[in-house]
Amino acid sequence: MTRFGLGFIIAGVLVYLLSSQTQIGWLYLLDAIIWSLLLLSAILPWYSLRSLSIERRVMAINSTVRGREFLGPVEDDNIEVQFSVKNAGRLGKYFIKIRDECPFDTKENRYRDFFVIKLKSGSTVYFNYSANCYLRGVYSSSNVTLVSWGFLGLWQRKKEFHLPWNITVYPGYFNLEEVSITNIAWGEFGQAARATAAGEIYGSREYRYGDPLKYIHWRNTARLGRFMIREFERAGKASLTVLFEAGRSFGSGRETTLEYGIRIAASLARLQIGSGGTVGIIAGECPVLFTGWNEAMDYLAAIQMEGKTGLGDVISEYEFDGFLVVVIAAADSELISSLISLNRQGKLAAVVVLEGFVENEALGENITRLTNSGIPLIKCSKGGLEDAVNQLGYMLLINEKLPVAIN
């Protein structure tokens, strides 16, 4: 019942009392009209939502990601959604409001409202809208709510439908294959460029944008007058493991230490697996090791914050192969000793410190301890994720922590 309907009931009671005292005929008539309208207004909303069925489906994914190799949208992609309302009853339905919940869109656009003034018997009405995949995650279903008002808006009735989405929104990532290594001075490698662990040289090819400059074939470059790159019989199968904390998170919305860790892991997985290496991702009790691109993205999309196992426990339990990239929050000082120990073992390729997510965080002391231990360090401020990821990719490439792509 609405406030207007409650006012009608109060008015009906008052008119009835007044007519009983005065015995005026038209007051009895007015009272009868009031209660009839209330009864009619109560029945119509109930009837209007009977025999209605509703369906929802994703029509298209408008993705900006090039070379996407998995099903489902990536963060910031748009999807086209269509839902339909069908009236299977014998009579028409009137004045129906439809509210569709889109759980992965922004907070402001989470709910979308549509109105049906009249829906004839046996007919179907269609609605289309575009939704932004703002939040990564696995979304199985959400509610669609139908609301109907009775005559004069005296009564209101709601009916909820639990409709499937069956959609996975994958985390966004940065394409580190496009990291501009050409910003390095050409003379940094020069004649000292050598084919380390990549394999035996069997030829050369013309330079392509993004190729590591350390593999330039200088002799063929001078002979042909254009930059040439060494090619190898096989690429190194270097292993890289990314660790970040999923037991707790600082920040809000998508600007959290957990979401930053997930995006960093996705970006490194894209580069590592695309270059012929293997990758492991550890963010809780169920890590994935030596995984493929699709499996890594499925794992990252499904991560939820769980406080059972912290990153410190993981570091102490696992025997790691290859190199490690660890993502920590500046406010988390508990891991400093564990990271220093890993660095002494020669396991650490880089540590990314996420800063600016907590007020008055004790950043200086932690950074000093890490840098004094000789740990390769990248600071990532809130809002500066892309720059930090590009720096990280650059650092790993020039320090030979990533394999060379097979050609």
Image (cartoon, rainbow, N blue to C red):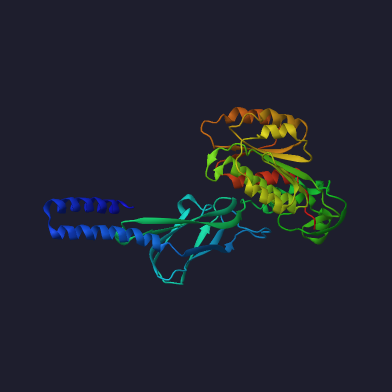
| In the foreground, 312 or 84 | 84
Q: Which quadrant holds residue 388?
A: top right
Residue ID at (71%, 57%): 209
Residue ID at (79%, 46%): 238
Would you say residue 373 is visible in this rendering? Answer: no
Percent x, y of residue 179 = 67, 51
Q: How many marks?
A: 0
In the rendered structure, the answer to whether residue 145 lies left or right of residue 4 reads right
Residue ID at (54%, 37%): 357
Percent x, y of residue 337 = 69, 27
| In the foreground, 367 or 204 | 367
In the rendered image of this protein, does residue 296 appear above or below residue 308?
below
Residue ID at (33%, 60%): 150
State which quarter of the image contains the C terminus: bottom right
Percent x, y of residue 219 = 84, 55
| In the foreground, 49 or 202 | 49
Percent x, y of residue 260 = 60, 43
Would you say residue 377 is visible in this rendering? Answer: yes
In the rendered image of this protein, does residue 275 appear above or below residue 366?
below
